[in-house]
Image: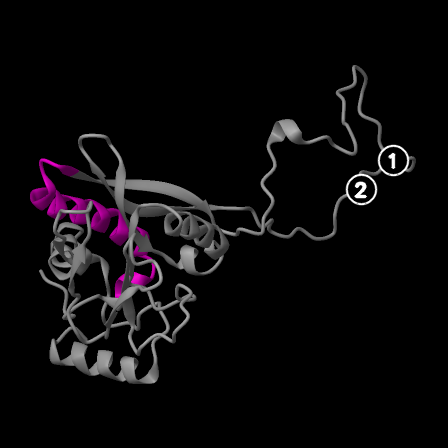
């Protein structure tokens, strides 16, 4: 059963976000590989980034405890009054978590050179892991790799630009290796289909088209998201007043609520 929305489904920006990306990256690679062979290959890949970049990750072998507790051959000693001291309160510990991040890498088959990186931006890239991703992004900008960024999430900061963004719920950004000072931008409203965008390759080879809406449609059906999402409830993501009004009216027209 298809999504009730004409383009991106805002309900997939919540609890189903990771599952959506896990399906979306391989579908993008599958779509591209039909057009790229035999000179190029697109591979979906996954990496993990820290959920909170400011956390300091220390290897256990690097830790030197301030107090060492050793096992004694005798019985454990109690306090002088014979009681064991217990803490009056217990609080949950905030631990660093690792979030999966999906992307598609295009390499030429002759020399295995990385030609184009397609990054599927997540809330982690745009919030707690933003600094980490921006460092990675700068590395791409100083390389010979084209960078295509697909941002299908309302939350978090957009990628930095010298000019203000046009109005839009979602964005696709393309930065070509020989035109670094300019980024091609596709703004996408919540009420319109996802665009078909060009994917650049090595010099002398024409761009290949990537139909983001077709990929989304295939993924929505393959992932069974029509069974997972309850459209009678509001989405987890925060929408503008205008978007929320349109969403409610649209779902009622589709008899989804």
Q: Residue at x 64, y 52 (%)?
A: 91
Span colored in magenta: 11-40
Image quadrant where one finds the C terminus:
bottom left
Residue 39 picture location, percent across and down? 12, 37
Q: Are marks 1 and 2 in contact (CB under 8 Å)?
A: yes
Q: Residue at x 35, y 62 (%)?
A: 181
Residue 99 picture location, percent across and down? 41, 47
| Mark 1 → mark 2, Cα distance in angstroms | 8 Å
Q: Is residue 142 magenta?
A: no
Vertical side of 103 occupied by 196: above or below: below
Q: Which residue is mark 1?
A: 79
Q: Which residue is mark 2?
A: 85
Q: Is residue 27 magenta?
A: yes
Q: Nearer the viewer, residue 60 or 208?
A: 208
The scheme the figure's colours follow is one colour
Q: Nearer the viewer, residue 66 or 90?
A: 66
Q: Which secondary structure lies at badge 2?
A: loop
Task: Choose the circle earlier in sequence order: 1 or 2.
Answer: 1
């Amino acid at each position: 059963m298809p999504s009730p929305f004409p383009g991106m489904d805002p309900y997939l920006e919540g609890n189903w976000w990771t599952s959506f990306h896990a399906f979306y990256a391989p579908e993008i690679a599958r779509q591209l590989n039909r057009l790229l062979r035999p000179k190029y290959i697109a591979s979906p890949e996954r990496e993990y980034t820290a959920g909170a970049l400011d956390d300091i990750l220390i290897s256990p072998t690097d830790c030197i405890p301030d107090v060492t507790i050793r096992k004694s051959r005798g019985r454990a000693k109690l306090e002088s009054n014979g009681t064991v001291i217990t803490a009056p309160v217990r609080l949950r510990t905030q631990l660093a978590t690792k979030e999966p991040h999906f992307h598609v890498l295009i390499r030429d088959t002759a020399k295995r050179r990385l030609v184009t990186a397609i990054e599927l931006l997540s809330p982690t890239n745009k919030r707690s892991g933003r600094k980490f991703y921006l460092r990675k992004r700068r590395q791409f900008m100083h390389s010979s790799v084209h960078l295509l960024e697909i941002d299908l999430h309302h939350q978090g900061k957009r990628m930095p630009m010298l000019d203000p963004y046009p109005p839009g719920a979602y964005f696709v950004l393309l930065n070509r290796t020989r035109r670094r000072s300019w980024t091609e931008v596709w703004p996408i409203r919540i009420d319109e289909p996802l665009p078909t965008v060009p994917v650049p390759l090595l010099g002398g080879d024409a761009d290949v088209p990537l139909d983001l809406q077709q990929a989304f449609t295939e993924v929505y059906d393959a992932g069974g998201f029509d069974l997972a999402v309850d459209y009678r409830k509001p989405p987890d993501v925060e929408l503008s007043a205008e978007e929320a009004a349109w969403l409610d009216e649209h779902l009622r027209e589709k008899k989804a609520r």
